[in-house]
Image (cartoon, grey):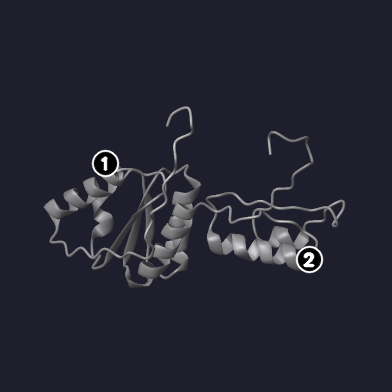
C-alpha cells in the first residue's frame, strides 16, 4: 500500500468492512490478500466482495502462503481435542496470531502465543491433559523441539504427531546463484 498513491488502495480488515465499502468505480476493482491472514476470514471477505461487485478481479492463483494454509488446517484438526494449544511464534507475526485465533475458534479450550521457551509460564499447563503445539510459518523447528525437550523433563509425554498435509515444496535458486 505504501508504494501506491494515497487512496489507490482500500484496506478491508473484516467482513463488516467488506459489506460497507463504497468504491469510487465498482466496475474497476481488483483484490489481493495478505499472505498470512486467516484462510477462513479471507474466504468470507472475498465471497462478500464477489457478491457485491461481480466484476471484481482477483489474483490468478492462490496468494495465501501454503505454509500458513497448512498450519491453519492442522490447528483446526487438533484444536477440538486440546485443553490448550501453544503457538510458538513472535507476537508481531500475523500468521502466528492467526494460528492462535484459529485454535480458539476451532474448539481449543485455550490458546496461547509463546515466542520462545523462556517466555512460557509453566503454570498455564496445570490441569492440561491434552496439549497441542504448533508454530508460526517463520518459527524455526528448533524452537518446537526445544519446548518438547523441556516438557519431557517435567512431564510424562505421549506425543502424537498429526500430519494433515505433506509439505514438499522446493524453491530453485536464481540462475546467478545456482
In the figure, is residue 47 to the left or right of 101?
Answer: right
Residue 164 x %, y %:
37, 66
Residue closer to the observer: 62 or 134: 62
Secondary structure found at label 2: helix
What quarter of the picture does the N terminus occupy?
top right
Secondary structure found at label 1: helix
Residue closer to the observer: 52 or 58: 58
Q: Residue at x 48, y 58 (%)?
A: 69
**Residue 118, numbered circle:** 1
**Crowdedness of circle 1 by 10 Å Cα count: few (<14), some, many (20+)?**
few
Q: Which residue is drawn at 87% across and 53% down?
A: 25
> How many labels, in total?
2
* Residue 46 vertical placement versus 92 (above, below): below
Give yes or no for contact between labels 1 and 2 (Cβ–Cβ under 8 Å).
no
Residue 142 x %, y %:
27, 43
In the figure, is residue 50 to the left or right of 145?
Answer: right
**Crowdedness of circle 2 by 10 Å Cα count: few (<14), some, many (20+)?**
some
Q: Which of marks 1 and 2 is nearer the N terminus?
A: 2
Q: Tell me if I can see residue 120 in this picture.
A: no
Residue that badge 2 annotates: 52
Quarter-wise, where is residue 51 in the image?
bottom right
Residue 96 x %, y %:
44, 50
In the figure, is residue 66 to the left or right of 31?
Answer: left
In the figure, is residue 169 to the left or right of 141?
Answer: right
Q: Residue at x 52, y 50 (%)?
A: 36
**Which mark is nearer the camera, 1 or 2?**
2
Amino acid at each position: 500500500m505504501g508504494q501506491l498513491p494515497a487512496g489507490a488502495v482500500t484496506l478491508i480488515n473484516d467482513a463488516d468492512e467488506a459489506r460497507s465499502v463504497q468504491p469510487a468505480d465498482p466496475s474497476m476493482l481488483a483484490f489481493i490478500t495478505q499472505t498470512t491472514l486467516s484462510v477462513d476470514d479471507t474466504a468470507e471477505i472475498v465471497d462478500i466482495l464477489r457478491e457485491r461487485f461481480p466484476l471484481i478481479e482477483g489474483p490468478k492463483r492462490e496468494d495465501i502462503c501454503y505454509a500458513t494454509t497448512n498450519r491453519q488446517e492442522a490447528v483446526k484438526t487438533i484444536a477440538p481435542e486440546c485443553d490448550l494449544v501453544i503457538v510458538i511464534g513472535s507476537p508481531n507475526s500475523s500468521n502466528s496470531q492467526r494460528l492462535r485465533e484459529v485454535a480458539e475458534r476451532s474448539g481449543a479450550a485455550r490458546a496461547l502465543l509463546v515466542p520462545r521457551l523462556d517466555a512460557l509460564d509453566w503454570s498455564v499447563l496445570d490441569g492440561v491433559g491434552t496439549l497441542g503445539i504448533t508454530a508460526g510459518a517463520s518459527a524455526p523447528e528448533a524452537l518446537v523441539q526445544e519446548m518438547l525437550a523441556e516438557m519431557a523433563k517435567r512431564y510424562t509425554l505421549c506425543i502424537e504427531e498429526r500430519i494433515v498435509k505433506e509439505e514438499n515444496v522446493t524453491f530453485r535458486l536464481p540462475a546467478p546463484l545456482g
